[in-house]
Image (cartoon, rainbow, N blue to C red):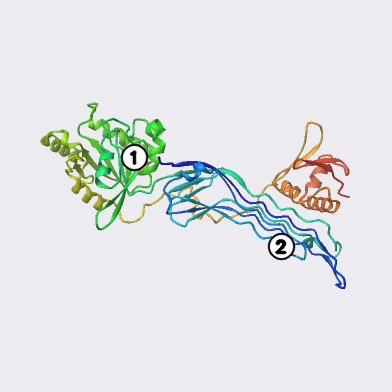
Amino acid sequence: MLYDKAHIFVQGGRGGDGCTSLRREAHVPRGGPDGGDGGHGGSVVLVCDDSLRDLQPFKRKAHHRAGRGHHGEGALRHGAAGEDLVVSVPPGTVVRLPDGTVHDLVTPGQRALAARGGSGGRGNKRFASPTRQTPRFAERGLPGEELWIDLQLKLLADVGLVGLPNAGKSSLLSVLTRAAPKVADYPFTTLEPVLGVLDTGDRQLVLADIPGLIEGASDGAGLGHEFLAHIERTRLLVHVLDLAPLDGSDPVASFELVERELEAHDPRLARLGRILALTKADLVHPEAAERAAAHWRQRLGEDVPVIVTSSATRRGLDELVAALTRATPVQAPVIDEAGIDALAEHRVFRPAQARAWAVERSADGMLCVSGPPVERLLARYDVENEEALAHVERRLERMGVIRALEEAGFTPGDDVEIAGTVFELDPG
C-alpha cells in the first residue's frame, strides 16, 4: 500500500539554562560571577532522501523531537547545543506548516527547517556591570517550536497513464515495465498509484499508473484529489481509451470527461503533451480499430499521436514506446513554485511596525499584559528571585510596558498579570 499522506508532530529542543555561579577560590583575587551560558536546543530538519519511496515510516512514528541544550556550568563553561533531528522524506514530498509556509522537497539532499530549537539562557556573568558586580540570577532556556505539520507525496514520474476505470492502464504498465499491478476484468482494480520503469536502451522513463478517474474527480469524488496529485509533476500524459468498453459507453464522452477533470484540477495538466492509446484492440475487428484511430487522428490533429494497442497481443507496443521516447522531454520537470518557499533554510525577518504586546483589564479589574515579547521575557527569569524581578521590571520599563500600565490606572505595588503570572509590580 502506498502511503502518500502523513500528519506528524515536530518539536525543537529546549535551550539550556544559564548558570548562576560565583567564583570563590583561596589565593585567587578578583573572583566574581562565572556562570556559563546554556546551549541552544536542536532543530527538526526535513531532508529529501532518494532511498525512500513513500511516507510509510511516519505511520509508525508520528512524534519527532530534537535534543535539548545542556545547562551552563561554573568557571564559564557553556552548555553544549542540542543535537538536530534529521528526518528523511522521499523525493516529491510537499511540507505544509500551520503558518501557511510550503516546502517542496524534490532534489536529494534538499533541506527544510520544520521546528526551530529554543535559544539557551545567559549565565550570570553576562549581567555583571560596574554597578551590579555580583548578579545572583541567570536566564532560563526557551522551549523550542512545536507544531503539527502535513506531509503529502506527489510521485516524481515522467509519464502518467490516465483514463476511466478499467480502460487498460494497469495492463499497459505490466507489459511495458516489470511492475506487477493488479489486473482484473472489473472497474477500480487499481486503488493506489503504481510506478514502473520503462528501459528503452538509450534512456529510462518512470511510468505512473493512476487509478481510474470518474466524474467529479477534481472535486474529490472517488479520491480524485489524492490520485490527481500524483500526475502534477509528470512531463507527458498517456490518455488510455478503451476501444471495447464493458458498459457500452461513448468513447468521445469518456475522453472529454477525463480531460475536463484534468483541466479542472490543474490547468497546467491541460497544457502537457499527450499520447492517445486506444487499448484492447484484440477485442474488436481490426478494421474497426483502424477506423477509430483515423477518427481520433482527425479529431486531435497532428500534435497528439494516436496509437492502437493491445496488451494481450502486444500490438502497437513498440510504436508506443518510440512515441514515449520522442515526446517525453529530457530536461527535469518544471515545478510551479508560486507560493513555495524555494530557499527552505533562508528566512528574512523584518522589525514589526506595531507594538507586539497589549495591556487590558480583566473581568475582576486586574491589569493584564499579553504578547510574545513579554511572554518570552517572563519565561526567561525566575520572578521569585528579587534581583531577577528587578531586572524584569527594568526591561518592562524600557519596552514601554510600565508607561502603558500607568496610563491604564496602574500604581506601584499593584498586582499585575503578565503572561499568565500574577505578581506585585513595584518599579520604584
Q: Which residue corresponds to mark 1?
A: 210
Outermost residue toward the left in this view: 287
Q: Which residue corresponds to mark 2?
A: 78
Q: Report x, y in % for residue 128.
A: 81, 63
Near mark 2 (Cα within 10 A), the count class, few <14, some 14-19 or many ≥20, is many
Q: Earlier in the sequence, mark 1 or mark 2?
A: 2
Say whether marks 1 and 2 touch (CB < 8 Å): no
Q: Quadrant of residue 309?
A: top left
Residue under the image location 65 percent in, 59 percent down: 81
Between 67 and 407, the one lying in front of the other is: 67
**In the rendered structure, which amino acid carries the disc numbered 1?**
Ile
33 with respect to 178 (left or right):
right
Q: Report x, y in % for residue 1.
A: 40, 40
Q: Report x, y in % for residue 233.
A: 38, 47
Q: Quadrant of residue 331?
A: bottom left
Nearest to the eye among marks 1 and 2: give it: 2
106 with respect to 320 (left or right):
right
**In the rendered structure, which amino acid carries the disc numbered 2?**
His
Q: Quadrant of residue 217?
A: top left
Residue under the image location 81 percent in, 47 percent down: 402
In the depicted structure, whether residue 151 falls above or below residue 135: above
How far separated are the C-alphas under marks 1 and 2? 55 Å
Report helix, strand or loop for mark 1.
loop
